[in-house]
Amino acid sequence: MPNLWSPSRQAQHDILKAFALLTKCAIGLFEPASDGDVREILPLEGFEPYCRKIRSFSEGNRLCHDDHIRRAKKVIESGIGGLTLCYAGVFNQALPIIVDGKVMAVLMYGQMWVEGDDRCAEARDCHESVIARLKPTEDDELELRFYYDEVKRFSRADVDALNQQLSSLQRWFYGMLREEQELHRQTENVIHDLQMRLQPILARAENLSRGLRQISTESRLVEDLLAVADELLKNVLAMRVPIWNLGKFMPEYRFELYPLGTLVEEAIALYKAEAERREVDIRTRLEKPSRIEMSRVHLQQAINNLLHNAIKYSFHGRYDLDRFVDILGEIDGLDYGLTFSNYGVGILPEEFDLIFQPGYKGVLTYAEYRSGSGVGLAITKEVIERHHGTIEVESVETSGGAYVNKFIVRLPYKQPREEVK
Amino acid sequence: MRIAWIDDDIEIIDPVIQPLVRDGHEITKIRTIRDALDSAEVLRTCDLILVDMLLPAGDLDEDFGYYSGVPLLRRLREEHGVATPVIVFSVVDPDRVREGLDPLNVAGYVRKPALPSELKTAVDAVLGAQSNSGAGR
């Protein structure tokens, strides 16, 4: 598989190259790899004539490379950089780039002589040692000595100023990279949820259409459904649809009288297999009549979201506790109240309003592996408010870190006359 | 042929493998990383593995990272000697996991959502290539 660079990574590369050209300092970038090793994003190559000459020897090239990797590893482990003397007698600066307390990368630049540094005498000794080690020809030795005396000079103040600018620039870049990665993950969560809903529809549609012997109305409907689903997914996957604008693909609101209990039953049927897999009991108690004026397709989506969340965020696996979702439907004057309760991952009080915002995922969900796009509750709230209803959340901690959560929905039996055709 | 399918959404997206079932393949379903590691012996003897990139750890205390399918596959290959051909069947953009998957000898990548026929084509291609080469387990 080819190694592809993202535009951001290319921009970072170009900025560092520009820095190298302007300052005449070679620059290298190293990042921690997932296996504990070091990854060279930009190798610190020979820029200074002296360093290029050293690297023209195969042993010199190897020693330079190993020296840089070793130093980068040390800085990643310790988080502490500094101006160091290389084995060949030139100075290099190692800068750890730290974002949110984590070393994201090490920037190394230099191949320079720093005026007034305490190690200048030691530097010359290193230069003599490397000549002895590489055993150059007479001409090569003359070149090495000449180039060494010509290594560009910097003052300590110059180096400090460069460090400040570079650190600031790179911290900005890595902060941006993390935001980009987080956005990608949120998008992937949305796509994951979408495909989970559409995959069985697509699959059943194709399986069904292959089983039909004649072109019929049902077959055409299946083909239309496939086309719509395919178009929607292509747009999302190509990121042409902003994540929070998926609502434009939903049909128009159309209000009619329909039993809320039936929507609850449909939702239970949809998630029955997942509930069984997670060993979550779904219990219902719905007062009648539950027939209210609603836009069926939208309210079905909202109820699906609430039930799916309740199942998803119920404890399972290592918790030997009752796992349940209770759905309670009660007549409340001119409204019908529907409450989804579950026992599991909780919601902190300061998040009671935040969880209805697009993209927000509860703090406590990160402690448990849970997939989710962060758009479900935002869409649910929008649908309920469009029905002139309300939705509230309660979450009470019990023993062992589990919470009893309630999503309380109130929907009027009748909509304002202008809504109903 | 025996196919192992490692995915935590199996019950929901099950219809996508119906053509494979109709073709007579035996499908073993595995839902978590823990279950996959416990089933290494089974995975070694299967003809093909379908694996998602986003998997729950199960009861394990370890952090497998976001694209947890990659370290799972690495561990199955390197620590459990599972050499079975693998098709990644996932919603994840392949560019996101390319670097991790490169050394793991993945035979194919089918991106979800996929039509059952697309998945069947990929599976047939890998199993067909395996038969032609006479590759054993």
Image: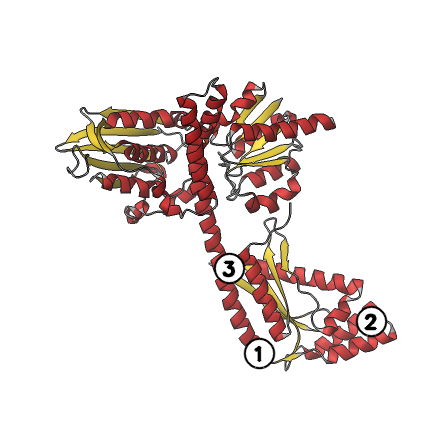
Above or below, A210 relative to A394: above
Chain where mark 3 sits: A
Above or below, A31 relative to A19: above
- Residue at 59 percent across and 29 percent down: it is B121
Q: Nearer the viewer, residue A395 or A43?
A: A43
Secondary structure under tag 2 reads: helix
Q: Earlier in the sequence, mark 1 or mark 2?
A: 2
Q: Position of residue B62 (x, y in %)?
A: 52, 41
Tag 3: Cα neighbours inside 10 Å, few (<14), some, or many (≥20)? some
Q: Position of residue B10 (x, y in %)?
A: 48, 28
Q: Earlier in the sequence, mark 3 or mark 2?
A: 2
Secondary structure under tag 3 reads: helix
- What amino acid is found at the position of numbered circle 1 in the picture? Asp
Is A366 on the left or on the right of A290, as rendered? right
* Residue A299 lies in quadrant: top left
Secondary structure under tag 1 reads: helix
Chain where mark 1 sits: A
Instruction: Tell me the residue that label 2 is attached to.
Output: A132
Can residue A359 be spotted in the picture? no
Spatial distance from mark 1 to mark 3, Cα to Cα? 24 Å
Q: Earlier in the sequence, mark 1 or mark 3?
A: 1
Instruction: Tell me the residue that label 1 is attached to.
Output: A158
Spatial distance from mark 3 to mark 2, Cα to Cα? 42 Å
Q: Which mark is residue A174?
A: 3
- Which quadrant would the N terminus of chain A be assigned to in this image? top right
